[in-house]
Amino acid sequence: MALRLGTLLTAAILFGGAISGGFAPAHAMDPAAGDAAAGEKVFRKCQACHAIGPEAKAKVGPVLTGVVGRPAGKTEGFAYSAAMSKQAEAGLVWTPDKIGAFLTSPKEFVPGTKMTFAGLRKDQERADLIAYLATFP
């Protein structure tokens, strides 16, 4: 019975995301579920385009300092794609769940994004990266 209930809950979460028109992760991304030290290693995949920290400057992608909880498209000195600007106007806020969904498949989450990264397929890598990003408020 517990297995069936878990399966039904998972299906409801996924189906609910499909109904809302959004790309929903299979589970919530809680920064506390990730390991920030491991996330620092995952961030190496991001460093070619993004910087983080008090002295960070925009590169090909925006600075990620303070990204957790920040409204999308709100980094000064960075020119966002029209697609990301549209998401920002619609009220997208980078919660851990939204960051997790975006990192799963950026082009699926925001069609037309300039971000060329294919995504992080492993749940733990995404959780670790989000935990790391959360250490830079």
Image (tube, rainbow, N blue to C red):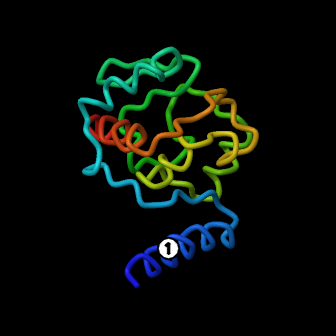
- Give the residue at x 69% y 36%: 113
Q: Position of residue 69 (x, y in %)?
A: 39, 50
Q: Position of residue 130 (x, y in %)?
A: 37, 41
Residue placed furthest toward the bottom: 1
The quadrant of the image that shows the C terminus is: top left
- Give the residue at x 47% y 49%: 94
> Considering only vertical position in the picture, is 2 above or below 102?
below
Q: Residues within 10 Å of mark 1 (few under 14, many from 20)?
A: few
Q: Position of residue 102 (x, y in %)?
A: 56, 45
- Give the residue at x 67% y 67%: 18
> Considering only vertical position in the picture, is 54 above or below 3?
above
Asked which quadrant contains residue 29, the reply is bottom left
Front in this rendered view, residue 36 or 91: 36
Front in this rendered view, residue 126 or 111: 126
- Give the residue at x 60% y 73%: 16
> In the image, is 110 to the left or to the right of 12?
right
> Considering only vertical position in the picture, is 136 above or below 111?
above
Front in this rendered view, residue 81 or 10: 10
Question: Number of labelled discs?
Answer: 1
Q: Secondary structure at mark 1?
A: helix
Q: Report the amino acid beneath label 1.
A: Thr
The quadrant of the image that shows the N terminus is: bottom left
Q: Which residue is mark 1?
A: 7
Front in this rendered view, residue 1 or 100: 1
Q: Position of residue 35 (x, y in %)?
A: 25, 39
